[in-house]
Image (cartoon, helix red, strand yellow):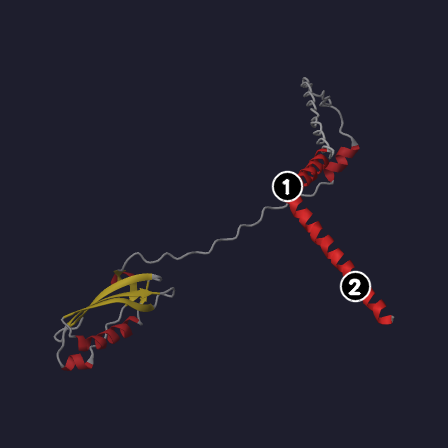
Amino acid sequence: MTSSTTSNRRSAASKRRLAGLAGVIIFHALLVYALVSGLAQNVVQVVQQKVEVAVISEPPPPPPPPPPPPKLEQVVAAPAAPKPQAYVPPVVNSPPPTATPPLNAIAATTSDPAPQPPPTPTPEPVVTAAPKGPISAKANCSSLQAPEYPDKAEQDQIQGVVRVAFQVGDNGRFHEISEIRFEGIPSRYRSGFQSAIAKALRGYQCKSNSLLQQEFSFKLDAAE
């Protein structure tokens, strides 16, 4: 009894499954047929119409705001220049020549300080002019001395002429030799002649701040 009931239930469940499976197959077959027959195209058109209607039914955008009004510049008129007035000279009442000056004027006159003496100008320093050129020592020196004959030159019988230009300082004494020229004297004897001449020039008393010249002749047969 129990086994037959169970088998009946299993057969009924399997029938329902077959019926459901058949219904699903039929539904898919109808759907394929609808797509092929154009039913789906109509559905798409209906959806597009709804979209277009929805788009068209949207409210238009608000209009743009009006432009701002132009600024009005206020023109200020320049003030008119004042008219020139005629110049009227002030009236000056000069006192009569015989009137006595007031006491205040006398007091003010007597209270003025005495004028200061002009400043004493400072004497400018005396600038000693540089010598313009060598001048004769014999005409501008009061004390002249002859140079000694160098011993070596005298032993070797060396003779010649030496021309010297020298400077004299503020005290009228020899300062230095500016130029010296030798004639007929070999070079190895020249330093001896120059030393002898410089020694003699230190004893000269000449015109101050001057450039002098002198010629010395060294001869063995006669002194200068």
x and y percentages locating residue 10 in the rendered image: 80, 65
SS at mark 2 in the image: helix
Q: Nearer the viewer, residue 187 or 117?
A: 187
Local secondary structure at mark 1: helix
Mark identifier at residue 37: 1
* Quadrant (top left/top right/bottom left/bottom right) for the C terminus: bottom left
Q: How many marks?
A: 2
Q: Compared to 3, does 19 lie above or below? A: above
Any part of residue 137 in sight: no
Can you give x and y, in whole percent of width and height, for residue 13 in the image? Answer: 79, 62
Q: Position of residue 8 (x, y in %)?
A: 82, 65
Which of pointers 2 and 1 lies earlier in the amino acid sequence?
Answer: 2
- The three-letter amino acid code for the residue at tag 1 is Ser
Residue 11's disc is: 2
- Tell me which corner region of the image, top left, top right, bottom left or bottom right, holds residue 156: bottom left
Q: Is residue 80 above or below residue 224?
A: above
Amino acid type assigned to the residue bearing label 2 in the image = Ser
Q: Position of residue 56 (x, y in %)?
A: 70, 33
Where is 196 relative to 128, above or below? below
Q: Residues within 10 Å of mark 1 (few under 14, many from 20)?
A: few
State the mark number for residue 177.
Answer: none
Question: Which of the pair 120/182 is nearer the observer?
Answer: 182
Of the pair 150 and 130, the residue shown nearer to us:
130
Q: Look at the image and tell me in which quarter the N terminus lies.
A: bottom right
Q: Nearer the viewer, residue 18 or 216?
A: 18
Label 2 crowd bin: few (<14), some (14–19), many (20+), radius 10 Å: few
Residues tagged 2 and 1 counted as in contact (Cβ below 8 A): no
